[in-house]
Amino acid sequence: MKDEILKLLPEIKKIKDKDLKEKVILTWEEGIKLGGWKLDDLERIPFTLLLPDNRINLIHHTRAVTSTALKIAEELIEFYSPQIKIDLDVILAGGILHDVGKLLEYKKEKGKFIKSERGKYLRHPFSGANLAYTIGIPAEVIHTIAAHSKEGDYGKRTIEGIIINHSDFINFEILGGKT
């Protein structure tokens, strides 16, 4: 399954830390398994259930958020270094994993994607952070998963957390989402 995940999410290859790279892949593998998904489902799962007639899938959205976050981080490093430090591996892993919890929050029933039983109780920032924790993802990456959505508005975000949060909402709002 590793090769298929790398084809779907080629941004994983940009992660320099080999252990982190492997754990990012393992997190997706475990999410797929626990959610009962098949690999070919991944490009059909909508990135959100909040937008009617949404045609953007979870993989496309994940890649867009990761790419947006990486470009923002690179620009900030160029303009504000050495005053700020941004860990690009955390940006990449956080972008790739920010919505991994949707593999547990959603299910497919009668050809439609809906909230799973688990998803009725736990939104994807919680289930994604928990999933990443069980795999051994570092705390600074788990933070970006947990804080990327509105749930993170009540705490302090790291620089990487701020970047992932804004990158996600840029990609959500330009498609008609409301915060």
Image (spheres, rainbow, N blue to C red):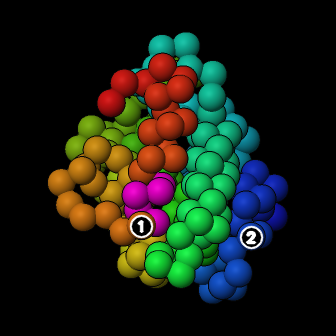
Neighbours of disc 1 within 10 Å: few (<14), some (14-19), many (20+): some
- N-terminal of the pair, mark 1 or mark 2, is 2
Q: Please provide the residue range marked out in magenta.
A: 160-164
Number of numbered tags placed on the structure image: 2
Q: What residue type is labelled 1?
A: Ile
Against 79, residue 167 (above or below) is above
Q: In this view, does 40 lie to the left or right of 7?
A: left
Residue at point 56%, 31% (across, down): 46
Tag nearer the camera, 1 or 2: 1
Residue 6 in the image: x percent, y percent?
Answer: 77, 61
Say if residue 28 shows up in the picture: no
Q: Which mark is residue 159?
A: 1
Residue at point 63%, 33% (across, down): 57
Is-magenta flag for residue 161? yes
Residue 155 in the image: x percent, y percent?
Answer: 20, 60
Residue at point 66%, 84% (across, down): 17
Against 132, residue 46 (above or below) is above
Quarter containing the C terminus: top left
Quarter containing the N terminus: bottom right
Per the image, the residue denoted by label 2 is 14
Q: In this view, does 67 lie to the left or right of 98?
A: right
- Residue 162: image quadrant is bottom left
- Foreground residue, 17 or 49? 17
Residue 129 in the image: x percent, y percent?
Answer: 37, 64
User: Helix, strand, or loop for circle 2?
Assistant: helix
**Alpha carbon separation for disc pair 1 and 2:** 19 Å
